[in-house]
Image (cartoon, grey):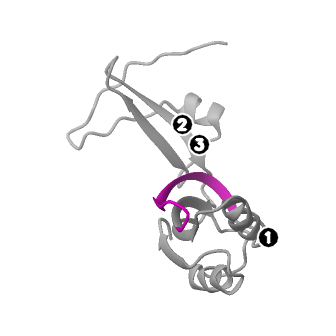
């Protein structure tokens, strides 16, 4: 595994420029989304390609039943709507009653608005509550 390193200067707004050959190698282009992570232990950042320039990202917060299979059913429902699930986290809100599932998804292939997606998930009864926040235009 080859690693390349470049020393770049931080500008007055805290920005750094990723060298063009690195962007090209990763498939990054104008409008792409990058995930930036901090490692406090070794005082480093990592930058990873998260989604392409054509992605339409949303963050969805679903309240689902806290029982076996509920998250799988909700994920299948989002997949059937042609959402590309890029990141998610879940937690129990009330044991045996309710859980929260937060998803970052690309809806560019869904052919539906965020509101239509929200209504369809509720209609399918895969969640008791759905909030959708657009992360890109």
Please tell me which of labels 1 and 3 falls first in the chain: 3
Q: Taken as a whole, is the magenta stretch helix, strand or loop?
A: strand
Quadrant of the frame with the N terminus: top right
Residue 63 on image: x %, y %:
53, 70
Q: Nearer the viewer, mark 2 or mark 1?
A: 1
Tell me: 77 left or right of 116. right
Within 10 angstroms of label 2, few (less than 14), some, or many (20 or more) residues?
few
Residue found at x 60% / y 56% = 53
Q: Residue 103 at x, y = what percent?
A: 56, 60
Q: Which residue is mark 3?
A: 28
Q: Residue furthest left?
A: 12
Residue 25, above or below 112: above
Whole-percent x and y of residue 44?
A: 36, 23
Identity of the residue drawn at 28% across and 31% down? 10
Element class at badge 1: helix
Choose the circle earlier in sequence order: 2 or 1.
Answer: 2
Magenta part of the chain: 84-97
Hey, which residue is sitting farthest front in the picture?
Answer: 96
Q: Nearer the viewer, residue 81 or 67?
A: 67
In this view, 118 is above or below 46: below
Q: Nearer the viewer, mark 2 or mark 3?
A: 2
Residue at 57%, 35% in the rendered image: 23
Question: Would you name the residue on which mark 1 appears?
Answer: 80
User: What element does badge 2 sit on?
Assistant: strand
* Image location (x, y in percent) of residue 84: 69, 59
Tell me: residue 19, above or below residue 49. Answer: above
Residues at marks 1 and 3, CA–CA distance in whole angstroms: 28 Å
Q: Residues within 10 Å of mark 1 (few under 14, many from 20)?
A: few
Per the rendering, the mark at residue 48 is 2
Q: Is residue 101 magenta?
A: no
Residue at 48 percent across and 34 percent down: it is: 47
């Amino acid at each position: 595994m080859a690693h390349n390193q470049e020393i770049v200067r931080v500008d007055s707004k805290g920005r750094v420029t990723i060298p063009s050959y690195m962007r090209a190698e990763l498939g990054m282009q104008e409008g792409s989304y990058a995930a930036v992570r901090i490692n406090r232990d070794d005082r480093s950042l990592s930058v990873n390609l998260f989604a392409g320039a054509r992605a339409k990202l949303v963050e969805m917060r679903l309240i689902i039943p806290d029982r076996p299979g509920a998250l799988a059913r909700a994920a299948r429902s989002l997949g059937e709507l042609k959402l590309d699930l890029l990141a998610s986290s879940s937690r129990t809100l009330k044991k045996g009653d309710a859980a929260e599932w937060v998803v970052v998804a690309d809806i560019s292939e869904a052919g539906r608005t965020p509101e239509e997606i929200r209504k369809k998930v509720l209609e399918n009864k895969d969640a008791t509550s759905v909030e959708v926040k657009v992360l890109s235009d």
